[in-house]
Amino acid sequence: MNRGARMLLQLFAPALVIAAGGIAAGTVLLELGDTPAGAAFAPIARSLQLGSVCAGFTMMMYSFWRLWRWERGLEPQCPCGGLLSRPSFGRRGHTRRCLGCRRTHSEN
């Protein structure tokens, strides 16, 4: 897998996992709705499915926005040309990880 594909996977995979997981959980709750004890879960299941699709769509739009800004040089970049992740705080202070080559860069 090349750097560009790895970067795109790291940008868009969380949104897809959230959407697919919510749809699957909602489907399981709808299947439980056939039983008398699980009938109360049907409204929750529909809300869970809709909410997860909306959350996944919002996350995907944010990833598209970051990618659009990166292509125009408005987002921080690694020397390899990859997009840097959000800042995180650890032992070395504020750092960012390259989504392409996975090197760590300090915020200084």
Image (tube, rainbow, N blue to C red):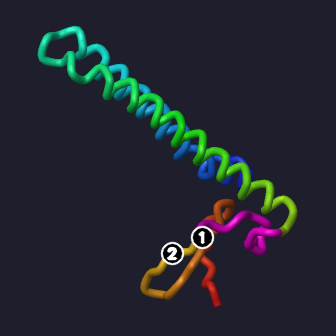
- The part of the image, by quadrant, that contains residue 84 is bottom right
Instruction: Tell me where residue 29 appears, x and y as whole percent.
Output: 28, 22
- Provide the secondary structure element on which disc 1 rests: strand
Q: Are marks 1 and 2 in contact (CB under 8 Å)?
A: yes
Residue ranking furthest to the bottom: 108
Q: Quadrant of the C terminus?
A: bottom right
Residue 59 magenta-drawn?
A: no
Say which label, 1 or 2, has the lower sequence index.
Answer: 2
Extent of the magenta region: 74-86
**Discs 1/2, front:** 2
- Provide the secondary structure element on which disc 2 rests: strand
The kind of residue tagged 1 is Arg
Instruction: Tell me where residue 3 appears, x and y as whole percent.
Output: 71, 55
Q: Report the disc number at residue 56.
A: none
Per the image, the residue denoted by label 1 is 97
- Above or below residue 19? Residue 46 is above
Please give the name of the residue rendered at 43% of the width and 28% of the height, measured from the top-left corner.
49
Instruction: Tell me where residue 50 appears, x and y as whole percent.
Output: 47, 30
Residue 80 magenta-drawn?
A: yes
The kind of residue tagged 2 is Ser
Q: CA distance from mark 1 to mark 2?
A: 9 Å
Residue ranking furthest to the left: 37
Number of numbered tags placed on the structure image:
2
Please give the name of the residue rendered at 59% of the width and 74% of the height, measured from the top-left corner.
96
Camera-side residue: 15 or 4? 15
- Above or below residue 96? Residue 65 is above
Please give the name of the residue rendered at 56% of the width and 79% of the height, measured from the top-left corner.
95
Instruction: Tell me where residue 35 appears, x and y as whole percent.
Output: 17, 10
Task: Report whether 107 appears left or right of 79.
Answer: left
Per the image, the residue denoted by label 2 is 88
